Amino acid sequence: MFRNYLTLMLLLAVSAFAATANADVVVVVSSRSPIKSLTAEQTAKIFLGKVATFPDGRMALPIDLPEGSGLRDEFYTRVAHKNSSQLTAYWAKIIFTGDGRPPKLLPDNAAVIKAVARNPNAIGYIDKAAVNRSVRVVLKP
Amino acid sequence: MPKRILLAVPLLLVAGISVAAEQKAESTAALAELPMFHFGGFGSLGVSHSNLNQGDYVLDSSMPKGVGRSSDWWAGNNSRAAAHVTADFTPEITAILQIDTEYRTDGSYAPEVEWLNVKYALTPNAYIRIGRIALPTFMDSEYHDVGYSYVWVNPPVDLYHQLSIPGSDGIDVTYRSVIGEAGNTFKANYGTNKLERPNSETTSKDMWGLFDTFEYGPATFHISYQHRKTSTLSYLTGTSGEWTQNSDLSVGASYDPGEWFVISEWMQRRSTTKIGAMYVSGGYRIDKFTPYLLYSQNSPGSFYAYSTPPTASARVRANRSQSTISLGVRWDFMRNYDFKLQYDQVKLSDDSNGYLVNVPAGVNLYGNKFHVISAVVDFVF
């Protein structure tokens, strides 16, 4: 019993490690979107609500993964140079002065891909391994 | 009464708009997926201690007492909470209501409407708001009570004590633009304010301001200019002072590449006297810990050469000059919570009792040094 438990914990630990180690985040838009590429700075501005539009003036609809997601932490660390508490502190400033709200949340990669593929205004970040033909990678941070 | 009418306007708008929102929801599928109402809040629970027993250390002039003479240990400087609701009626129309509780002028923790306004987006990057609105006088003034949003226990007291008007009942307009890789946010506002102090009430009218924030990579620059006419009603004499002109100019800059930060602000107020204040601060983030240093000071209120020579007591009242050296650490010990510990050494200038209140008549603490130690837990939800 104890050994089974130990094996399970070890497997969980290894898979958790593997998940973080392999998580290579990429920024995607719908393959129907005219946006071909974005800089980290442009992407950060969209996700931090500093601008509501893509550089070409089209409305941007950023989609977030939930707090605690490894991909989310990696995305914001690389693109906006903010860890999760810095990001929470940032949004506290915006929300509690009524200047805006954080992006819409979807539970996982699959949901983000589906939403991004459907909406040419949407932009999300997903695991590189999950990229398919319905979306286009616009930034590899 | 005018204030009540002004606050009723957003409420009526909200009522009318919610009906319109139903009909418009279909055409705005993108945002309609976000829930219409978003609830949240924030708070701080803390205590501070001062080793000075002849005066009270306070954060702003609305507080009737603080830590020091009135009590050795005191939670009133460091404890507050607020509940917030944002309502997105349509992609263009949003309303917010924020109710906060903190130590008040009357000695209570009575809840008050901190912000209540309706926002209308003219374009995706420009909006107009009507109601009670936060003023971006200094870099952190719109959220000066949201402890979780900054590194210190409080925004630097020597400068933020000058934030006599945190908000405005009126109208403002915001315009965001992107210039190459840089971002710019411009705000302009017009409104009124009523501020209670322990023995008086100051009314500000014809209040207008221009505020600009420019961000380039990790660098942020802020400049603001505000003008207003103020009159103070003394509760003791029952008489109102004349309307005087006030103008505030402030400039700030910060650099925050992620692992460390530096920030500095400077301000100057011109009313019957000229007052200045500044601070400079920096810190380094080591995993969940952010140790920081802070130096701040304000300058004595100097009278203009052309004005009537002030009385001796006016001269003393105008001089709030002090400086502070602080060191502290913020610890992000769990999601949405932080713990902060800060040590301040406050030095009163040679001819001033600084920002101290409740100093007994006839006592002068000129040139004194004292320390304040604060511990606080901040949270957001």
Image: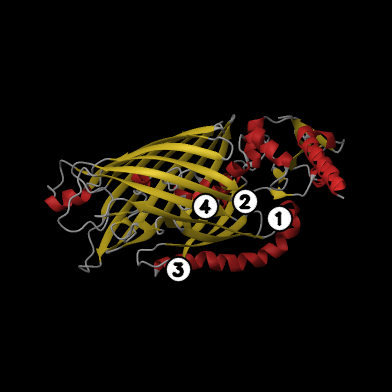
SS for dot 4? strand
* B333 relative position to A115: left or right: left
Q: Mark 3 belongs to which amino acid?
A: Ile
Q: Residue under circle 3?
A: B5
| Whole-percent x, y for residue B120 in the image | 58, 54
The numbered mark, 4 or 3, whose residue comes first in the sequence reads: 3
- Measured along the vertical axis of the image, is residue B366 above or below residue B19? above
Q: Mark 2 belongs to which amino acid?
A: Arg
Mark 1 or 3, which is nearer the eye? 1
At 12% from the left and 47% from the top, the residue drawn is B309
Mark 1 or 4, which is nearer the eye? 4
- Measured along the vertical axis of the image, is residue A140 above or below residue B240? above
- B215 or B315, which lies in front? B315
Q: Are marks 3 and 2 in contact (CB under 8 Å)?
A: no
Give the CA distance from mark 1 to mark 3: 31 Å
At 74% from the left and 41% from the top, the residue drawn is A124
Q: Are marks 1 and 4 in contact (CB under 8 Å)?
A: no
SS for dot 3? helix
Q: Is residue A131 visible?
A: no
Tell me the number on the disc at residue B34.
1
Q: Are marks 1 and 3 in contact (CB under 8 Å)?
A: no
Give the CA distance from mark 1 to mark 4: 27 Å
Count the numbered circles shown: 4
Q: Residue under circle 4?
A: B378
Quadrant location of the C terminus of chain B? bottom right
Q: Are marks 2 and 1 in contact (CB under 8 Å)?
A: yes
At 77% from the left and 35% from the top, the residue drawn is A23
How busy is the neighbourhood of tag 1: few (under 14 within 10 Å), some, or many (20 plus)? Answer: few
The numbered mark, 1 or 4, whose residue comes first in the sequence reads: 1
Q: Residue under circle 2?
A: A101
- Residues at marks 1 and 4 on the same chain: yes
SS for dot 1? loop
